[in-house]
Image (tube, helix red, strand yellow):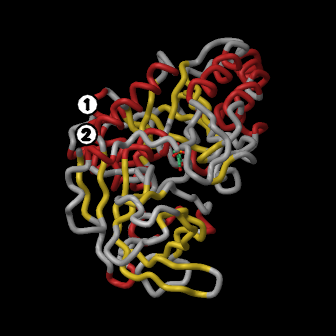
Amino acid sequence: MRHKFSIDSLDVLQKQTPFFAFSLDLVKNRYQEFKTHFPDSIVNYAMKANAEPEILEVLAKEGANFEVASVYELRMLKELKVPGSKMIYGTSVKPAEHIREFHEYGVERYAADSYEEVEKIALAAPGSLVYIRMTVNDAGSVFKFSEKFGTEKANVIPLLVRAKELGLVPYGISFHVGSQASNPRAWAEAIEELVPVLNELDEKYGIKIQMLNIGGGFPCAYASYEASVTLEEIATHTYEAYAILPYKPYLMLEPGRALVAESGVLVASVIARVERRESTWLFLDAGVYSGLFETMAYQGSTRYHVTSLRPSFSSGEKLFALAGPTGDSPDVMSRESMLPQDMHVGDKLVFHDVGAYSLVAVSPFNGFPKPDIFFL
Ligand SMILES: Cc1ncc(COP(=O)(O)O)c(C=O)c1O
């Protein structure tokens, strides 16, 4: 088990559960790892993964750029005085009034994946820089985006040409290999597909794109993740593919999950131990609606590493099912967590690597409030 977050550093452990605790140093280190493995690239933090102001602030101070998904996220960055030049508006289908607010704030770069969107951007943010999102093979990823977003490769050139006709700058091409990817060559394979596209754009239309956005998708080593793909491995394959491009647009990245997942833990208490059919169930004071929604089947069935805060008194472990406190039947985080067999009411459990796509999806379902958050 690989936990970068040191439980020993948790002097908040006596606090009322449930709560999240984050290490801001881990966020910083992870950002620097991206900069090391992808030198000269622009790293835009996909803030949809975790938009807590402390996290945004630490990344802004480190020099990160931001991939922003709505005016609501934009306003959070405005509060922190992040300039528009450090942002891209990365959702490829957007409300026109949101685009206008981004434009007024000085954001120049916009994603699109249809004629309608290019035309909308030309009206709402005239003269801006547009990049076209292309669908790629996302078969090896837990969360797939290619059904909802991206246009086929054959449409990339006509869309960039249309952008130019409308007075926009045909700035770049983007793709997203899907979140929590397991194929370390996924990014490289997508880049390889672009060789004929870049050639034709240049030779036939005199367009050379400035930027290639390789998206997010960089994985976290959850318990449910069998591949052990490192950033280094991904970067090696990616740069090999990049080397065969006919010219070198600068690289942009949009990591969300991999920048913040390992920086956070959730601490929860056992509120009931119940024997039911084949399993022993531990009901906790936190569940899928308290930030663990990626454990739900429709959200990918992520299994987090879970540990007990105290060692077993009677030595020995057994499998437990873990459920949240609400009256909803899908509020189940695991059916096979190995924990000390004498777990009882009041014991505390730690869910590891829960920094991404957790707090942003908390729901007040059944009236349970958002867990407290501590930053170390
Ligand atoms: C446009 C865009 N960029 C980046 C990301 C971040 O992806 P990940 O968290 O897998 O790195 C997402 C995730 O939904 C996205 O939609």
Q: Position of residue 83 (x, y in %)?
A: 28, 34
376 or 257: nearer the eye? 376
Q: Residue at x 29, y 45 (%)?
A: 8
The answer to whether the beta carbon of the residue marked 1 is less than 8 Å from any atom of ligand 1 is: no
Q: Residue at x 32, y 83 (%)?
A: 367
Look at the numbered discs 2 and 1 and tell me whether their residues touch, using CB distance below 8 Å. yes
Asked whether residue 264 is in view, the answer is yes
Depicted 335 relative to depicted 122: above or below: below
Answer few, some or many: residues within 10 Å of disc 1's Cα (few below 14, many 20 plus, some between 14 and 19): few
| Mark 2, secondary structure of its residue | helix
User: Residue at 49% of width from left, 31% of height from top?
Assistant: 129
- The x, y position of residue 137, in whole percent, is 75, 42
Q: Position of residue 119 (x, y in %)?
A: 56, 46
Say which amino acid is labelled 2.
Glu
Q: Is residue 50 left or right of residue 235?
A: left
Front position in the image: 272 or 353:
272
Q: Residue at x 58, y 31 (%)?
A: 230
Q: Nearer the viewer, residue 319 or 137?
A: 319
Disc assigned to residue 61: 1
In what quadrant of the picture does the C terminus appear? top left
Query: Which label sits on residue 321?
Result: none
Q: Is residue 281 above or below residue 221?
A: below
Q: Is residue 201 left or right of residue 248?
A: right
Helix, strand or loop at label 1? It is helix
Q: Is residue 113 above or below residue 309?
A: above
Q: Camera-side residue: 52 or 336?
A: 336
For the question of whether residue 164 can be seen, the reply is no
Separation (CA) of disc 2 from disc 1: 6 Å
The residue that disc 2 covers is 57
